[in-house]
Amino acid sequence: MLRLTYKLPIFLAFVSLLLSACTQATSPATPHAQKNPQVALLQQEDKVLIQNAAMVISMDPALGEGNLGIIKNADVLLVGGLIAAVGKGLQAPDAVTLDARGKIVMPGFVDVHNHLWQSMIRGCGSDQDLMDWLNQCGRFSC
């Protein structure tokens, strides 16, 4: 069992695929909770145990198999908004349990579309069409 310390907002994306099939969550209405009550459940509970995931992609080769740290038939325990443990057969009798049978639990994507790198070539080929711009600026020749 490995203890991890990811913040809950980042981890919420981690379970987004799992939660799409969960319908057991109920919570007081907040603007975000009205859109996705499962997120509100995770935010309000002190302990959440995600059990029986067909696959957990931990992104830690030391924890699982291969470069992605894949663990088959595994669980993820959240305590106080942090990932407390990842492994097989985790027990937490006082936790809210989400059945992830047949699901993949994986890290979510945060800001997957970013143009910050283009600031290095700002203004390069601004008078060019796309193909000329790629030819001129793609090689950082400005």
Image (spheres, rainbow, N blue to C red):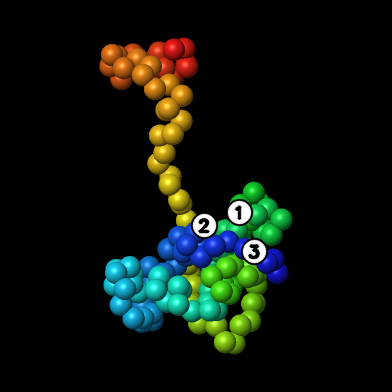
Q: Residues within 10 Å of mark 3 (few under 14, many from 20)?
A: few
Q: In front here: 47 or 99?
A: 47
Q: Is residue 57 visible?
A: yes
Residue hosting label 1: 59
Which mark is in front, 1 or 3? 3
Residue type highlighted by circle 3: Leu
Q: Is residue 95 left or right of residue 62?
A: left
Q: Is residue 10 left or right of residue 64?
A: left
Quadrant position of the C terminus in the picture: top left
Mark 2 lies on a secondary structure that is: loop
Q: Residue furthest bottom?
A: 93
Question: What number is the disc on residue 4?
Answer: 3
Residue hosting label 2: 107
Q: From this view, report whether residue 4 is shown above or below residue 128.
A: below
Q: From this view, report whether residue 70 is shown above or below residue 122.
A: below
Q: Is residue 52 visible?
A: no
Q: Quadrant of residue 13?
A: bottom left
Q: From this view, report whether residue 118 is shown above or below residue 126.
A: below
Q: Where is residue 128 drawn, in percent x and y?
A: 29, 14
Q: Where is residue 126 drawn, in percent x and y?
A: 31, 17
Residue type highlighted by circle 2: Pro
Which mark is in front, 3 or 2? 3
